[in-house]
Image: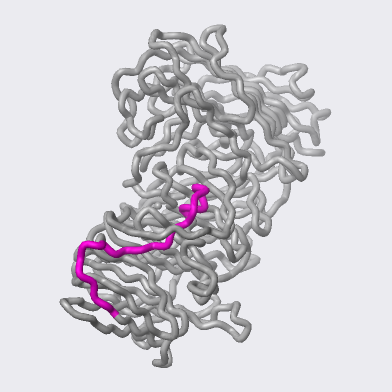
Amino acid sequence: MQPDKSRAATRHRGAPGTVRRMVAASVAVVGAAGITAAALPAAATATPPRPTLNTGHTTRVTLPTGDKLLVTRDASGRVRGATPATRTHQTFLTEHLGKDTYVLPGTALAKLGKGMSLAQFDVTALAAGRTGVNPGGVHPNFPMRTATITVLDAQGKPADDAGLAVVNVDDSRKYANFPEAVNGQARISVPDGHYALMAYHATYDAAGTSVTGEWISFGRFTVSGKAVTSTVDMRKATSELSIGTPKPADTQAVDLTWARGSSDDAGLSSGVSTDASHPVHVSSSPSGPGVQHWDVHATLTSPKGTAEPYQYEAEFATDRAVGTNQRYAVTEDSVATIDTRYYADKPRTGQSVWFSALPWEFLVFRAGVEQPQPERRTVYLSADDPDLTYSSMVVARFAEGDFYGEMDSGVRTFSPGQQARIDWMRGPLAPGIPGDTGVGDYYCGACRQSDTMSIGLAPVTDSTADHSGYLDPPGDGTVSSSHFVLYRGSAKLADEKDVVGGDFPVPAARSSYRIAYDQTRRAPWTAQSTTSHTEWTFSSTHSGTAGVPGRFVCADGTTAKCSPVNLLLPRYAVDQTLDGRVPVGASSLVLTVTHAAGNPRTPIEGATVAVSYDDGKNWTKASVQDLGGGRYSAGWDNPASAAGHTVTLKVTATDSTHATVTQIVHAAVTVAAQ
């Protein structure tokens, strides 16, 4: 998910000589000092985290309400992104303070203090497998005063179960918290200072399950030597939120985020993520001491049945103040246009999520768009803010409460008027290392610090360089396994199953190395790229200086004495249909061979391509033409006897340093039936 540019550069790694496990779990943005908190039990579960190279750790968590989320953690372990793993249409409240992020369904707000605590919704703790903590923002070294906050609803009556975010804007280390107003009132103890607050209130249908209206109102008060009272009136939330688009579009989700504090590095954020089935009203919030940010994001899609589907990811951010007019409009000259193609060899229902983020955002919560695959869709991205970054996630199969065939992108920026094409799951899908987009932190998948070699493969990559994916959990017709072996000369340094690499102590002297990686990925939702065998050979020597950009995250979380390891990475652009079919007769692909990120672009000296129609028993060489710059065009003829069957693909490549790669992908593509 989309981490911002300022993420802490630390990485959870094992001690030298340990391996990184390939956890087969599918699917997949600073804090105030001096915060006190009390630990409470967390009645929820989480699957173990697994390493990702671009976006930290993606973990599936279950809230005590039964709601399932996918959360993405940055290199320091802080949750930066979240998306619901269910089709439920409801409001989620997001709160971030210090090192912890909380996500709770709106319906759970009334249960806080009545058998449930905010600590149980601490998704940072759930993702890390630790006990959740209740947020607490009082510095103990100051005289405390009682602040009584009254919240009135849209009828001027005490609001039942309103959520609050309250922060000291002089020094947020003195106080920042999320109290709840019960029966319209909250009483808190705070030191002297200037305070800002946001109040949230919702109304529900008779069953108490569906939201009928939501209100967000802001306030401020000053504490100076004595107790104070303050009133937040939802009747002041007079501006109804709306998003206009150049083409007709239906709003699928709206995400509102307020960040407030004494600085961007200290304070809190509070957010509301909801659907568009009811009105949302917002009040204004004037500028004042400290910092204030307000962000409105919306996902909108073309009306059902549109022949050429499209989607808007609309973003509107303001600083210093929240305006009185919450009516926004996307303009044609403010967006980037992305021709997005989702490949699928079997018809299926998947999901896509775009995570947009600004540097000040602590957390990005986004709901995905369920979609048929294969599909071609035009996505319009707000791009008029140069600080706005995007990353995205696509899953091949979306089922209630679960994701399968997850793939993530790196972090990108776009500009107004830009046109680009992004392919998802365009096969063959094979192990590799995702490319560096040049934006945000990059987690080095093949680097060496001093005399520790660190390898972290992505089990699945596709034709787009910055994409990386993982294997589904085994079971229910799914087989996921791998075998990783590392050699120095003829000596075996590692031989492990179901790992993607590790951190290995190696001699300082230059030596020759070889990695052999075998993988099986069979799942009900696909019949392609089922098994693969990849071998890399390369040389490596002691790294005494930093040889990678400062954005890189190496084994110890820094770039000290970190240099890239020269793995060659093949990328395939097979001329195929969206359902992964090639014709009987002439077929072709463009092979691009690159180096693992950070390496100098030493010349690629040659490449070969071969195909097999009997699972690798016999090979037919393809004609290969050197296009320059590591790109090769390959062509071959598929016989009529191959119609309806899959093709196994084999490529080899070498560069001027004598580094090599050999990759065999079984069931790489399918010859169309006649």
Residue lying furthest left in this view?
225
Q: Residue at x 59, y 84 (%)?
A: 205
Question: Could you say where residue 263 lies in the image, as x and y percent from the top left?
Answer: 23, 59
Q: Is residue 586 visible?
A: no
- Left or right: residue 74 compared with residue 672: left
Q: Residue at x 48, y 11 (%)?
A: 658
Q: What colour-coding does the image apply?
A: one colour
Q: Is residue 132 magenta?
A: yes
Task: Residue 286: name its quadrant.
Answer: bottom left
Question: Could you say where residue 254 lies in the image, as x and y percent from the top left?
Answer: 47, 68
Q: Is residue 417 magenta?
A: no
Quadrant placement of the C terminus: top right
Question: Could you say where residue 58 lies in the image, as x and y percent from the top left?
Answer: 52, 46
Task: Residue 406: name its quadrant.
Answer: top right
Number of disc labels:
0
Q: Residue at x 48, y 10 (%)?
A: 512
Q: Residue at x 63, y 39 (%)?
A: 24
Image: magenta residue range:
124-147
- Left or right: residue 119 compared with residue 185: right
Vertical position of residue 652 compared to residue 520: above or below? above
Dominant SS type (magenta): loop
Q: Is residue 44 visible?
A: yes
Question: Could you say where residue 392 lies in the image, as x and y percent from the top left?
Answer: 49, 49
| Front residue of 529 and 188 | 188
Vertical position of residue 110 compared to residue 641: above or below? below
- Left or right: residue 627 compared with residue 541: right
